[in-house]
Image (cartoon, rainbow, N blue to C red):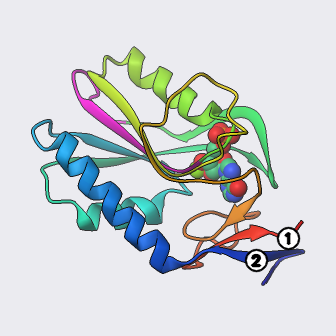
Amino acid sequence: MKLLDKEFDLFLSHEEIEKRVKELSEELDEQYKDRKPLFITILNGAFIFAADLMKHSNIQSEISFVKLASYVNTQSSGEVNQLIGLVENIYNRHIVILEDIVDTGYTIQNINETLNNRGAKSIEICSLLVKPDSIKVDHKVKFVGFDIPNDFVIGYGMDYEGFGRNLKDIYKIKS
Ligand code: IMP
Ligand code: MG
């Protein structure tokens, strides 16, 4: 598959993704059923993951969105910019951060710090993908869809230079 100037191979099919997302949603329901969690989705990448998770969820919860960006081209820049902020009251809330992918971990560290300063009661991370060999911060991702190698991926919300978010399956870059 070609997107812009790069070639990609199929990596995770939408069937595999859907199955895992449903399992994650059931796990979250079980752990958060009496806690009225606030799900905070990191835009843009996590919008499809968050929507699919929520469709399977059967507990009382709220969902909100922040827009953060750290990626330039196919590399993390190490600097996280907040492009759209958070208006909800965070104090005393149980927060679950929804991410598409944790790479260096700088993004989740940044949002975690913000939420801590605003008095969240608990904060956990739920990420569809994690690149364990790439993480540079000491932060545990409690709910993980798939651990993946350090290759650049697209699809299911994730982009290359803004393109490819609409792909149903997840593809990884050809080496
Ligand atoms: P981190 O701050 O390095 O953990 O990067 C996290 C953000 O970078 C994610 O929310 C994604 O939006 C983006 N990102 C990281 N790895 C990839 C990738 O392989 N493909 C597309 N986007 C990625
Ligand atoms: Mg993202």
The amino acid pointed to by label 1 is: Lys
Judge whether 167 appears above or below 127 on screen: below
Query: In what element is the residue under mark 2?
Result: strand
Q: Position of residue 70 (x, y in %)?
A: 69, 41
Residue 163 part of the magenta-drawn span: no
Q: Residue, x 54% and y 79% (percent of image)?
A: 168
Residue 174, image quadrant: bottom right
- Quadrant, the N terminus: bottom right
The reply to whether dot 2 and dot 1 touch (C-beta < 8 Å) is yes
Judge whether 144 appears above or below 140 on screen: below
Residue furthest out toward the left: 34
Q: Residue, x 47% and y 26% (percent of image)?
A: 112
Mark 2 highlights which residue? 9
The amino acid pointed to by label 2 is: Asp
Q: Residue, x 76% and y 58% (percent of image)?
A: 152
**How many neighbours does mark 1 have within 10 angstroms: few (below 14), some (14-19), or many (20 or more)?**
some
Q: Position of residue 60 (x, y in %)?
A: 12, 50
Judge whether 150 appears above or below 122 on screen: below
Q: Residue, x 41% and y 72% (percent of image)?
A: 18
Query: In what element is the residue under mark 1?
Result: loop
**How many neighbours does mark 2 have within 10 angstroms: few (below 14), some (14-19), or many (20 or more)?**
some
Which stretch appears magenta? 87-101
Mark 1 highlights which residue? 174
